[in-house]
Amino acid sequence: MPFTVLLLAAALGAAPPATGTPMPTGEALTARIEASDARLFWAAFEGCDAKALPDLLAPDFRMIHDKDGLALPSRDAMIAGVAKNCANRMPGGAHAGYRNRRLLVPGSHRVRAMGDWGALEEGAHVFFEWNARDARWDMVGGAHYMHLWQWMPAEARFRLSQSYSYDHAGAAPYPPASAP
């Protein structure tokens, strides 16, 4: 860390740099964030596994959403929300049999190191719901997102600290009106 940054951090009363496993860089950083992203969305969507979330979320996690504002003020709220949604999908639940999935838009995903503190991830994704009547996945919408992943040196892993979800929109009609 450059001396001027250390001096400024000391003057502001910041904690010294964390010790432990160094944060991955380059392709290793991108691979780790991609793996964490995949686990997060699998747990919240297709896998419906709220028990996987505590290891992925920082203790001070929160989610800001373009439609709901502060949609999830805490890690506990995120875990409870996913658990409730998963329970509702079970036989006898309010949404028994409901299935959804999320897919990244190819070419939209980027990961940037934020010093040795963590990484900023951004991308676009689309959402699908299972149409049991026609036995197919129907695209129902999409959005953009930014995730701020904090590197936990003592744990040698990333945890999601902040989630920003925006530009939500329904799926465009298909075929387009202009199609012959």
Image (cartoon, helix red, strand yellow):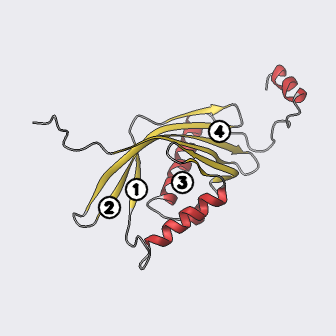
Q: Which mark is residue 24?
A: 4
**Separation of residues labelled 3 and 1 (CA atoms):** 12 Å
Is the residue marked by circle 3 packed among few (<14), some (14-19), or many (20+) residues within 10 Å? many
Q: Compared to 4, does 122 lie above or below?
A: below
| Horizontal side, residue 1 vs residue 98: left or right | right
The N terminus lies in which quarter of the figure? Answer: top right
Image position, residue 14 (x, y; %)? 85, 34
Find residue 101 and name its label: 1
Q: What's the distance in space between the residues labelled 1 and 2, CA to CA?
A: 8 Å
Q: Are marks 1 and 2 in contact (CB under 8 Å)?
A: yes
Q: Inspect the image, locate mark 3, and give the three-letter code of the amino acid beneath it.
A: Leu
Structural crowding at the residue carrying mark 2, measured as other residues with C-alpha within 10 Å and reported as few (<14), some (14–19) or many (≥20): some
Q: Nearer the viewer, mark 3 or mark 2?
A: 2
Secondary structure of the residue carrying tag 4 is: loop
- Reading the chain from its start, which is encountered first: label 4 or label 2? 4
Q: Left or right: where does residue 1 sit relative to residue 177?
A: right
Assign a secondary structure to mark 3: helix
Give the residue at the far bottom of this rendering: 92
The Cα–Cα distance between marks 3 and 4, rounded to whole angstroms, is 19 Å
| Upstream in sequence: badge 1 or badge 4 | 4
Q: Secondary structure at mark 2?
A: strand
Give the alpha-carbon distance from disc 1 to disc 4, as whole Å.
Answer: 29 Å
Label 2 sits on residue: 130
Which amino acid, mark 1?
Arg
Q: Are marks 3 and 4 in contact (CB under 8 Å)?
A: no
Q: Residue 115 sits in which quadrant?
A: top right
Compare residues 104 and 90 and report the one nearer the observer: 90
